[in-house]
Each structure stands twice: as structure tokens, then as C-alpha cells.
Image (spheres, helix red, strand yellow):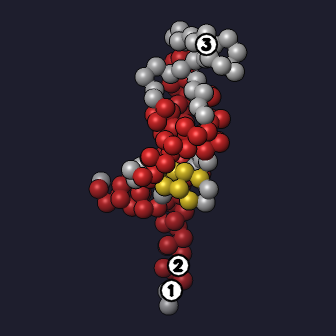
Amino acid sequence: MKKNGTVGVEKLLEKRESLVAQMDALKHKISGLEMAIELFDESPEIDSEAPDRGSYSVRLPGLSKAGAIRRLLREAGIRGLDSRAVVEGALSLGFELKLNSVASVLSRMKREGEVVYADGRYRLKEFTKAGRRLADATG
């Protein structure tokens, strides 16, 4: 049987872990916003053949499909995203992704251990308890 003080410390440690994860997610969101701001200073790559997107679409230079998905998952942090939310979020990054394509990339990322699927959402491993413990242990 645990003493009240031990239970209290465990709760505080869990709360700290949650706040650290939220802080990391906010740092990534700020980084994403800074990149978006920089884009306004650059000329967008125009794709006049983009279907269902009006007259053009904007893509972040050098960002792959998997890179865009990683970025969205990083911004989501511990909340994670389902496949549909990834498709919607990708539009804000200038990617028009099909649901089956997103599912395929997420499946590969899961198979490779980069993401974890739980409660109907995908999360980067770093935003799971096991991932944070591993990061803490390795420095």
C-alpha cells in the first residue's frame, strides 16, 4: 500500500510529464507558424493543374508527403490525429492528399515504429509515455 505522499508525487510527476509534452507541442506549433510567416515573403510555387483547389495550390518547398504528415502529428502532440484530420491539415500546408494515401503513409510509419495508433488516433512515438521515457533515458 502506498503512502499518501507517494501517490501525490506520482500525480505531480504525471502532470509534469503532460505539461512538458504540451510545451513541446506548442514549440512545434510556433515553429510552424514562423515557417508560414516566412512563406509570405517568398513566391509560392504555382500549380495551375491542381484539381479542386481553385486556380493554384501552394506547397512548402522541400516538404514531402511523409514530412507534412510528421509535421502535422508533431503539432498535434499528445492529442494525435486521425487520418481525416491529417488530410484536412495537409491542405493548410499546401498538400492535397487523398485519404487512402494518408492511410498508407501512416500505416508505413506505424510499421516502422515512428507512430503509435491508439484510441483512433495516430501520435508520434515521442508523444507517448514509452517514447518520452526512452527520450529521457537516452539523454
- Tell me what residue is drawn at x 49 percent, y 55 percent: 116
Q: Amino acid at mark 1?
A: Lys
The residue that label 2 is drawn on is 7
Q: Nearer the viewer, mark 3 or mark 1?
A: 3
| Image: 32 above or below 22 | above
Mark 2, other Cα within 10 Å: few <14 / some 14–19 / many ≥20:
few
The reply to whether callout 2 and callout 3 are in contact (CB within 8 Å) is no
**Residue at coordinates 52% horizontally, 78% vertically from top-left?**
7
Task: Say few, some or many: other residues with alpha carbon within 10 Å of mark 1 (under 14 / 14 to 19 / 20 or more).
Answer: few
* Distance between mark 2 and mark 3 Cα atoms: 60 Å
Residue under label 3: 49
Kindly indicate the quadrant of the structure image that contains residue 4. bottom right
Residue plotted at (69% across, 21% down):
52
Q: Secondary structure at mark 2?
A: helix
What amino acid type is highlighted by mark number 2? Val
Q: Secondary structure at mark 3?
A: loop
Q: Looking at the image, is mark 2 or mark 3 nearer the viewer?
A: 3
Residue 37: give x, y in percent of width and height: 56, 20
Q: Earlier in the sequence, mark 3 or mark 1?
A: 1
> Would you say residue 28 is visible in this rendering?
no
State yes or no: discs 1 and 2 in contact (Cβ < 8 Å): yes
Please give the label number shown on residue 3. Answer: 1
Q: 22 or 3: nearer the eye? A: 22
